Amino acid sequence: MTTINNNYLKLQGSYLFSTVAKRVAAFKESNPGKKVISLGIGDVSKPLVPAVIAAMHKAVDEMGETATFRGYGPEQGYSFLREAILKGDYLARGINLSADEIFVSDGAKSDVANFQELFSPESKVALQNPVYPVYLDTNVMAGRTGAFENGRYGGIVYLPCVEENNFAPELPQEHADIVYLCSPNNPTGSALTRAELKKWVDWALAHNSVILFDSAYEAFISDENVPHSIYEIPGAEKVAVEFRSFSKTAGFTGTRCAYTVVPKALEISDGKGGKTSLNALWLRRQTTKFNGVPYIVQRGAEAVYSPEGVEQTREVIAGYKENARVILDALKNAGITAYGGQNAPYVWLKTPAGLDSWSFFDKLLTEACVVGTPGVGFGSCGEGYFRLTAFNTPELTREAAARVAALKF
Ligand code: PLP
């Protein structure tokens, strides 16, 4: 009889968002007159900006003419978009990469999930705790972990990110071949400074390890001290892969477009005494398993880098950042300690004494009719914390914030 991949049986049910949804639905049913506001969503509320819409309309028209119609495109992405990314996100910051080190894709989620395929099944994985669950679950599926016991998978090196270390992971005491770093971070909203990131790059160089650097929230950085790209750190091109997305930067969560940078200088052991280029391997993987992002979508993403696109997306991000400020102010007024929100769309609050993540969820829902996400759902080190997002509309964010500020603890 055909047998399943047993690693899938090690996966823990994704209870977090379904439990949140169930509790909210039950509350709404027993309180039909009450207006519930969600600050739990990780999805944007603002539409695509006019520059993107105009570019996509034009591309739709091109698809209706024989002379300009496009079928399958290059798996790595059209060169017009890779060149725009190169210029806008890298050359402009003094980072020397080339367009063939950039791979356009349908999402940072799929890239960050798929990239681990290139490493041996025995590779040791380190990741932050709490964490964006995709890094962990995809390594469970690939068989790089033991069983799940006492809130942890065997074989994984967990890097606690808590108040005591300012949510910045410390270097592991044991060897790790692959390290996932997410900065600006989901869920903690913190971001690694230049000095903190340099520490990781130097460690990876010294230990022949690879950093998988997820900077899906790069556009939210305002602190001068926080690098926008890991390649701002000397030597990073030899040890790091960078994942970026148009989802939160330009509202592409439903449109789908992202990119991954795999520098040619990044080589790892072939297990036989030689070295292999990860760039060549990723190209091989993508040309086999992926058929590219729609032309219309790539034209839309290209427009994000036009002068109008830059201006319009900047305004959208500024709006979300203002929401984060409103949330942080409200929490301060309620006497709650909170982090993040400066370089990320996430505010990470410390639940007041006596309340764990889920009791805080219940109090917020029943007393303020506001929904957020219990921190423990992102990993054991998230217990006692709670995530609020800045992605709702300014009006609803203000209303929710005023209700939170009025809470008594
Ligand atoms: N990486 C992080 C850290 C995220 O929080 C998310 C989405 O929530 C993604 C990647 C997914 O990005 P995309 O929409 O490009 O798949």
Image (tube, rainbow, N blue to C red):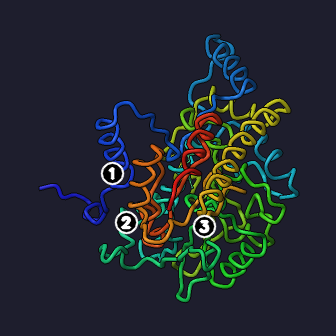
Determine the secondary structure under disc 3: strand
Q: Earlier along the polypeptide chain: callout 1 or callout 2? A: 1
Q: Nearer the viewer, mark 1 or mark 3?
A: 1
Tags 1 and 2 touching, CB below 8 Å: no
Q: Nearer the viewer, mark 3 or mark 2?
A: 3
The residue where tag 3 is placed is 181
- Residue at the image position 47 percent from the left and 46 percent from the top: 368
Determine the secondary structure under disc 2: helix
Mark pair 3, 2: CA separation = 18 Å
The residue where tag 2 is placed is 140
The residue where tag 1 is placed is 19
- Residue 166, x across and y down, in percent: 65, 74
- Residue 277, x across and y down, in percent: 63, 65
Mark pair 1, 2: CA separation = 22 Å
The reply, left or right, for residue 178 in relation to residue 195 is left
Residue type marked 2:
Val
Tags 3 and 2 touching, CB below 8 Å: no
Q: In the image as oriented, which residue stretches furthest toward the top?
A: 65
Q: Earlier along the polypeptide chain: callout 3 or callout 2? A: 2
- Residue at the image position 80 percent from the left and 64 percent from the top: 232
Q: Answer few, some or many: residues within 10 Å of disc 3's Cα (few below 14, many 20 plus, some between 14 and 19).
A: many
